[in-house]
Image (cartoon, grey):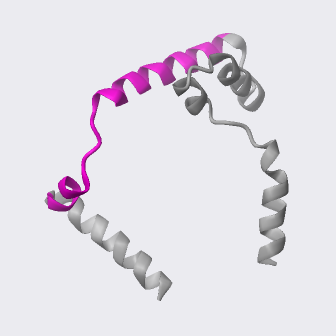
Amino acid sequence: MTAFIGGATFLASPLLRESPRWLVARGRIDEARAVLLAVRGYGLDDAEVEIDEIRAASAEGSKVAAPSIMQVLTNRHTRAPVLVACFLQMAQQL
């Protein structure tokens, strides 16, 4: 059964579309617009608004640096959730 599901996913993968956010980040605006029009049923104006929102969010996100692993582990607010997630993943494998 697992092989059937994997095979079906593999065969259907060419039908998947790229994310509009990913396309905008790589400068492929026309393709992002086409995906928004096809998937969400937007009009052209609505698609342009969302592309502008994606650009604004990308610009804001690029100003914030991602924390290093040491910063995550030494921060008392993030240490416990990260350790719990790691423990759960190890326990699942066992």
Q: Quadrant of residue 47?
A: top right
Q: Quadrant of the N terminus?
A: bottom right
* Residue at 21% across, 64% down: 79
The residue sitting at the bottom extreme is 94
Q: Is residue 63 left or right of residue 24?
A: left
| Residue 12 horizontal/vertical position (percent) | 83, 52
On the image, the x and y values in percent for residue 21 come to 56, 31
The residue located at (76%, 43%) in the rendering is 16
| Total tally of numbered discs in the picture | 0
Q: Quadrant of residue 14?
A: top right
- Relative placement, left or right, of 73 versus 26 is left
Would residue 67 be counted in the magenta stretch?
A: yes
Q: In the rendered view, does 91 fall on the left or right side of 22?
A: left
Name the main secondary structure of what is drawn in magenta.
helix
What's the residue at 36%, 72% (across, down)?
86
Between 66 and 41, the one nearer to me in the picture? 66
User: Looking at the image, which is closer to me, 75 or 65?
Assistant: 65
Q: Is residue 13 magenta?
A: no
Which is more toward the observer, 9 or 53? 9
Q: Position of residue 38 (x, y in %)?
A: 77, 27
Q: Which residues are magenta?
A: 45-74
In the displayed image of the protein, which residue is found farthest to the top? 45
Q: Is residue 34 above or below residue 86?
A: above
